[in-house]
Image (cartoon, rainbow, N blue to C red):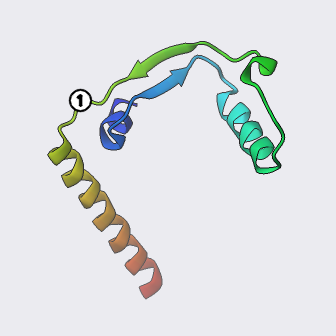
């Protein structure tokens, strides 16, 4: 998670809840249908940890550019076959 925080350049909050992804999907579906939803109605889990970014902006840009190049190469290989 710390790598994600570094590459995003923003804090990443992790909840101590096994079904957090399912709750996120439910919230996304509700929002797409304009259904109001409150986290409290589901008994939102407290945060267990927040990862703060520590990577310098120039290093972040370099690594993201490398990732983008790797994606482009993999897409080219898929279409070539």
Q: What is the crowding at mark 1: few (fewer than 14 residues within 10 Å), some, or many (at least 20)?
A: some
Depth order, front residue of 40/3 = 40
Q: Secondary structure at mark 1?
A: loop
- Drawn side of residue 25 relative to residue 46, left or right: right
For image coordinates 70% across by 27% down, the residue present is 19
Task: Name the residue rendered at 64%, 19% in the picture.
Answer: 17
Q: Residue at x 75, y 44 (%)?
A: 31
Residue 58: percent from left, percent from top: 15, 47
Please say if 57 is above or below 19.
below
Report the number of discs. Answer: 1
Q: Is residue 81 something one can see in this rendering?
A: no
Query: Looking at the image, which is closer to me, 65 or 38?
Result: 38
Q: Position of residue 76 (x, y in %)?
A: 38, 80
Residue at (51, 24) in percent of width and height: 14
- Quadrant in which the N terminus appears: top left
In the displayed structure, 43 sits above or below 20; it is above
Q: Position of residue 15 (x, y in %)?
A: 57, 20
Find residue 25 and report its image quarter. Answer: top right
User: Mark 1 = which residue?
Assistant: 54
Q: Quadrant of residue 43?
A: top right
Does residue 7 appear in this view?
yes
Please state which of residues 34 and 63 is positioned toward the viewer in this rendering: 34
Question: Please, is residue 60 above or below residue 39 in the view?
Answer: below
In the figure, is residue 20 to the left or right of 68?
right
């Amino acid at each position: 998670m710390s790598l994600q925080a570094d590459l995003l350049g923003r804090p990443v909050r992790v909840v101590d809840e096994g079904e957090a992804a399912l709750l996120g999907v439910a919230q996304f579906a509700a929002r797409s249908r304009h259904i109001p939803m409150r986290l409290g109605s589901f008994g939102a889990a407290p945060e267990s940890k927040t990862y703060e970014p520590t990577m310098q902006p120039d290093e972040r840009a370099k690594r993201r550019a490398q990732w983008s190049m790797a994606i482009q190469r993999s897409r080219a290989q898929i279409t070539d076959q």
